[in-house]
Image: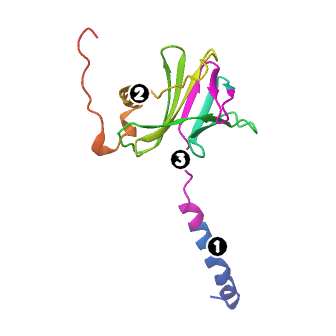
Amino acid sequence: MRPTDLFRIPLIIPLLVLASACAAVKEPPPAPAITLSKAIYFITPEGGDLLVSPGTYEVKPGKGARLELVSSRGLPGSNQTLEAVATDTGQSLDAPAALYIPWENDEHHIILVQPSGQGLEAVGSGSGVRSRGAAYHPLPSSVVKKALDKKGTDLFSTEQAPSTTQPEAGK
């Protein structure tokens, strides 16, 4: 070893530590997403109407009882905040899941379910028509559970994975 090599060692060690720290940093998993095939009217936290355009959106929890939709187009100011209600599926998941469920009477539900099984649900309308003072209600938990089952068993904690039964003939 030459004497000049001794001066390089203090420079090399911090670089090695920095390189190993960068390799250990993991990207957070992407937020779950939904795709809307048509424009849907939702209610803002202030009580106004908000028309959400067709497209793919990451679904994130907002402050309080709110859902944040983040457009996959990544346009500045394209985040949209929806009024939501708390819901509980009673099922544990391995990762958050987002669901879009069109329902009867022109209702459209966006649901974000956390690994604990608790979540937030925003309810909208394709027509934008809503009765004065009428409140939307969350979907029955059985409907949400079926949608989660359909989305994939990889979402469920290993101890609570749904049973896989064969459908009856003719159904």
10 Å crowding of disc 3: few (<14), some (14-19), many (20+): few
In the image, what residue type sits under mark 1? Leu
Looking at the image, residue 99 lies above or below residue 66: above
10 Å crowding of disc 2: few (<14), some (14-19), many (20+): some
Task: Identify the residue at image location x=60%, y=34%.
Answer: 83
10 Å crowding of disc 1: few (<14), some (14-19), many (20+): few
Instruction: Look at the image and give the residue range highlighted in magenta.
Output: 21-49
Looking at the image, residue 143 lies above or below residue 106: below
Q: Nearer the viewer, mark 2 or mark 3?
A: 2
Badge 1 or badge 3: first in the primary sequence:
1
Quarter where residue 45 is shown: top right
Label 3 secondary element: loop
Badge 2 or badge 3: first in the primary sequence:
3
Report the label total. Answer: 3
Quarter where residue 167 is shown: top left
Residue on which disc 2 sits: 147
Magenta stretch encompasses residue 91: no
Task: Identify the residue at image location x=70%, y=37%.
Answer: 74
Task: Identify the residue at image location x=61%, y=33%.
Answer: 57
Residue on which disc 1 sits: 15
Label 1 secondary element: helix
Label 2 secondary element: helix
**Residue 70 in the figure: left or right of residue 117:** right
In the image, what residue type sits under mark 3? Pro
Please tell me which residue lies in front, 2 or 24: 24
Residue on which disc 3 sits: 29
Work out which quarter of the rendered image holds the N terminus and state it.
bottom right
